[in-house]
Amino acid sequence: MTEGELGLSPLCLIVPGLHDSGPGHWQTIWERERHDCLRVQLGMWSDPVRNVWISRIDQAVGAAQGPVVLVAHSLGCQAVLWWASLLGEDAPSNVVGALLVAPPDVDRLGADPRIERFAPTPKSILPFPTIVVASNDDPWCDADRADELACALGAHFVLLDGAGHINADSGLGAWREGQDLLERLLDVRPRTPAALNPNPRGNPPRASSRAYSPR
């Protein structure tokens, strides 16, 4: 990241999941209401190809003129994890954080064949601060599995109460609590070793396992 880029406000790259995010989805509302959000056009929304989605994320990050925070939902989370896993230490330094919301369990028996294409779930420590958000009644992933994933990624974990798949059907509207979490990541820049892991002897501080209601 250049000296000029350090003074720029991060761009929030919206990474939807299967079928894209419709007009009532918080991702779409954020993109419409916030000045700092831009959707990654992954394409093939109903029949995703993992490598295509990874490539589109990489192109969007590369095209950004400054720092980036990835804001992913559902299968978009898995695409972000694969992108970061494949790049490893070569991940662009302009990515300063990721908000991963409702990642599906692509490894479970009987998963939708379209999301099975993203198995196995990459579980390496991410090279940027990350928040994983899940719900205790998400039909696509058990809360314990989401917690395990967050731990493996070295991410901060937040568990919602009764928010389902944290999508348009959840009735979250602009999801102000989610924007509060996003603001935490927007404040962590530039990406430095201290920002990556404020606790050098272990993972970043984790949220309480106590669920709370998003409404």
Image (cartoon, grey):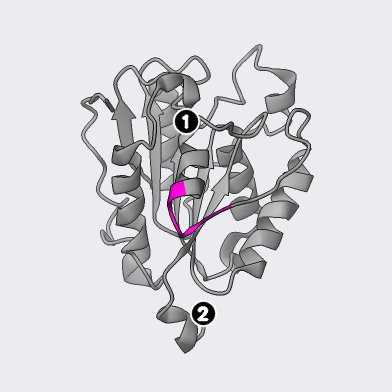
Left or right: 20, with 67 as reference point: right
Quarter holding the C terminus? Answer: top left
The amino acid type found where label 2 is placed reads Met
Q: Nearer the viewer, residue 115 or 184?
A: 184
User: Was residue 35 drawn as part of the magenta stretch in this picture?
Assistant: yes
Indicate the position of residue 146 as horizontal and vertical percent values. Answer: 43, 29
On the question of residue 68 being in view, the answer is: yes
User: What is the spatial separation of the Cα atoms under label 1 and label 2, in whole angstroms?
Assistant: 30 Å
On the question of residue 142 being in view, the answer is: no
User: Was residue 137 drawn as part of the magenta stretch in this picture?
Assistant: no
Left or right: 180, with 189 as reference point: left
Circle 2 residue: 1
Left or right: 18, with 197 as reference point: right
- Point 46% across, 60% down: residue: 36
Indicate the position of residue 175 as horizontal and vertical percent values. Answer: 35, 36
Give the extent of the magenta segment: 33-38
The amino acid type found where label 1 is placed reads Ala
The local secondary structure at tag 1 comes to loop
Q: Nearer the viewer, residue 65 or 191?
A: 65
- Point 26% across, 59% down: residue: 199
Picture layout, residue 93 above or below residue 139: below
The local secondary structure at tag 2 comes to loop
Indicate the position of residue 75 as horizontal and vertical percent values. Answer: 60, 33
- Point 41% across, 70% down: residue: 9
Q: Are marks 1 and 2 in contact (CB under 8 Å)?
A: no
Picture layout, residue 109 above or below residue 191: above
Circle 1 residue: 102
